[in-house]
Image (spheres, rainbow, N blue to C red):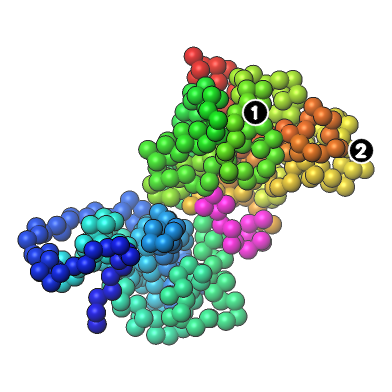
Amino acid sequence: MAEKINTGSHDLPISDALAEFMRGGWAGTREDVPPLPVAAYAAKRRARLAERLPGERLVIPSGTLRARSNDDDHRFRTHSAFAYLTGGQQPDDVLVIEPSGDARLFLHPRPSRAESQEFYRDRRYGEFWVGRRFDLAEADAAYQIECAHIDALPAALNGPARVLRGVDASVDALVSPAGDDRDAELAAVLSELRLVKDEWEIAELQQAVDATARGFEDVVRALPAALAHPRGERYVEGVFGMRSRLEGNAVGYQSIVASGAHACVLHWIRNDGRLDPAEMLLLDAGVEGDNLYTADVTRTLPLSGRFSPVQRQVYDLVYEAQTAAIAVLRPGVRFREFHETAMRVISDGLREWGLLSRAQADAGLHRRYTLCSSGHMLGLDVHDCARARAETYLDGVLEEGQVLTVEPGLYLQPDDLTLPPELRGIGVRIEDDLVITADGARLMSAALPRRADEIESWMAALAG
């Protein structure tokens, strides 16, 4: 069968003489590859998955490359379930857990240079184009899993199987839908296994949070230059993005850099506005570590270095709501309770300001100004474990080892006529990352100040 090579429209033709010349004269480059640091933990996770769905073949792809434009691909980011079970971060790999519980990893190994032109011709997989991959022996050693060539996958999927669908269309096509929602159950179980983090995951998350704190410090130091730039929001985005690439894989999600009324847009990622020293900056950003665990932190900063009275009024109410919510976190508490606690504080505050009547507050009309929930699970995905069933997550109870965000906010839209003019266009969110402990919760992002006076002192110290 002819070798499939991914080439571009403008690639130069390869003569027979050049092809022959490229086959030889290369030094051997077999590497002594140690096991990935996560390998032992990943093995335990695969065993738990096999126990949850015993006697079944389970198929989890890593995902595929996606074109950004024409023949230029986005930087690959593996599917979180695949990373959780293997530690792998390469496209087009597929983990198969057999009914016996044994695992095999099917992958696209580094080919022989004497037998293949891929290494110098293939834009997607060629070593000269995208870098070196493991050969099969190296992959065995790194992942501590039996590894096989991806070409052997169709023959291996010769019977019933559950597939994590929607990740790799070519894998979906190899297995008929399992029916009776069995594939959906696999996706749910894969999310639910990640609800409680092991010690390795918590350490990875703490590293990401610590790097994120340094990124916020970078931003504060860069504010004078950002204030002078016509796209100050984008300047801030770039400063934080540099920290994320220096200390991790990337940002864990598109950074929200929202000045002034942009802070009232929950997912403002255009980041093309000016910064005004009379306004505040809402920065929601997180570093994703090299092993793909992400932080998720938000601070709302006065761009002048000091909150105006009305800015502080709004900020303090959100701070009080977050502090009350954090105080309820402990094992056995309903997941929804911290959000409900925060919203009671917000609702009472809005009533005290005269924005809501008692009847309106009792009817939950504070949501006009808060819109979204006050937190979520955190891990490999910024909104982690999203396919877990409600009874195990949203309607469940907190457990030791879970990591979550607490992020109440007030979003007072610039065109909202129910608000007095001085409040319109102010958006405040305060978000921190916490791990549930045996008797409460530990604030992982404690390196960043939360209280208004602490924010002002911190900004002054960094400016000096």
Residue drawn at the location 43% of the way across and 80% of the way down? 174
| Between discs 2 and 1, the one toward the N terminus | 1
- Rate crowding at label 1 as few (under 14), some (14 to 19) or many (20 or more) other CA atoms within 10 Å: many
SS at mark 1 in the image: strand
Seen from the viewer's position, the closer of residues 248 and 161 is 248
The residue carrying mark 2 is: 357
Residue furthest bottom in the image: 159
Is 254 placed left or right of 112 in the picture?
Answer: right
Q: Position of residue 209 (x, y in %)?
A: 48, 38
On the image, the x and y values in percent for residue 21 come to: 9, 65
Prevailing secondary structure of the magenta residues = loop
Q: Residue 281, can we see it?
A: yes
- Span of residues in magenta: 381-394
- Residue type at mark 2 is Ser
The quadrant where residue 450 appears: top right
Look at discs 2 and 1 and give the one toward the viewer: 1
Figure check: 187 above or below 128: below
Q: Image check: 253 left or right of 170?
A: right
Quadrant in the rendering for residue 421: top right
Q: What quarter of the picture does the N terminus occupy?
A: bottom left
**Of the residues shown, which amino acid type is indicated by label 1?**
Met
Residue ID at (71%, 24%): 312
For the residues labelled 2 and 1, the Cα–Cα distance comes to 28 Å
Q: Which residue is mark 1?
A: 280
Asked if residue 386 lies in the magenta stretch, the reply is: yes
Q: Position of residue 144 (x, y in %)?
A: 29, 62
Q: Is residue 223 visible?
A: no
